[in-house]
Image (cartoon, grey):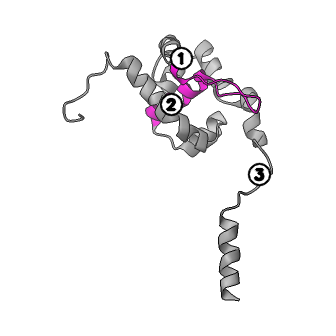
């Protein structure tokens, strides 16, 4: 009896759990209520100082950086879902670097799951570094 119990327990570990939903409803409303499409657009137009405070750069500088990093961070849409826009990835990354907010906090502000943020953030940081390495002075202690 004991070995049967262990077999059942271990056989259930390998099975994938069926998902009840592909995307949570509140995340699916990102385009209508997320910070990228609502708050940051408003700040760029109405309050440039607050935009700069949020991302630690002006909207003009943000647009310039976005043009440089887009080719390396943009993904293709698939039949299953649309890829996250490069603009959104860069905004989340800059907010993370500027504030040190947790992925959970960024998840609710931008309506992007924290597991997704954890996947693209290192890629965007690497791209930013590649674009800006001529402007960044790295200490010999860091190498």
Residue 98 lies, in percent from the top left, at 45, 31
What's the residue at 51%, 21% (across, down)?
72
Q: Which mark is residue 128?
A: none
Q: Is residue 59 magenta?
A: no
Is the Cβ of the residue at disc 2 closer than 8 Å to that at disc 1?
no
Helix, strand or loop at label 1? It is: helix
Question: Which of pointers 2 and 3 lies earlier in the amino acid sequence?
Answer: 3
Answer left or right for 16 relative to 135. right
Question: Which of pointers 2 and 1 lies earlier in the amino acid sequence?
Answer: 1
Helix, strand or loop at label 3? It is: loop
Name the quadrant of the C terminus. top left
Which span of residues is magenta-colored? 70-99
Residue 69 lies, in percent from the top left, at 49, 18
Residue 27 lies, in percent from the top left, at 72, 38
Whole-angstrom CA distance, mark 2 to mark 3, is 28 Å
Helix, strand or loop at label 2? It is: helix
Residue 140 lies, in percent from the top left, at 19, 31
Question: Which of pointers 3 and 1 lies earlier in the amino acid sequence?
Answer: 3
- Which quadrant would residue 82 be assigned to in this image? top right
Whole-angstrom CA distance, mark 2 to mark 1, is 16 Å
What's the residue at 54%, 21% (across, down)?
51
Foreground pick, 107 / 8: 8
Up-down relation of residue 107 to residue 59 (above or below): below
Q: Which mark is residue 19?
A: 3
**In the image, farthest residue toward the bottom:** 1
Foreground pick, 113 / 45: 113
Whole-angstrom CA distance, mark 3 to mark 1, is 33 Å
Closer to the observer: label 2 or label 3? 3
Residue ID for mark 1? 71
What's the residue at 50%, 40% (across, down)?
101
What's the residue at 54%, 34% (across, down)?
120
Residue ID for mark 2? 93
């Amino acid at each position: 009896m004991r070995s049967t119990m262990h077999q059942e327990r271990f056989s259930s570990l390998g099975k994938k759990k069926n998902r009840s939903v592909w995307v949570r409803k509140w995340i699916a409303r990102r385009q209508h209520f997320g910070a990228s499409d609502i708050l940051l657009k408003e700040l760029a137009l109405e309050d440039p100082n607050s935009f700069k405070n949020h991302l630690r750069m002006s909207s003009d500088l943000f647009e310039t950086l976005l043009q440089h990093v887009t080719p390396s961070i943009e993904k293709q849409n698939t039949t299953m879902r649309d890829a996250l826009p490069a603009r959104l990835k860069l905004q989340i990354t800059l907010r993370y670097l500027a504030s040190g907010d947790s992925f959970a906090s960024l998840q609710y502000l931008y309506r992007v799951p924290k597991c997704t943020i954890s996947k693209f953030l290192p890629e965007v940081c690497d791209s930013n570094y590649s674009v800006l390495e001529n402007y960044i002075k790295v200490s010999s202690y860091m190498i």
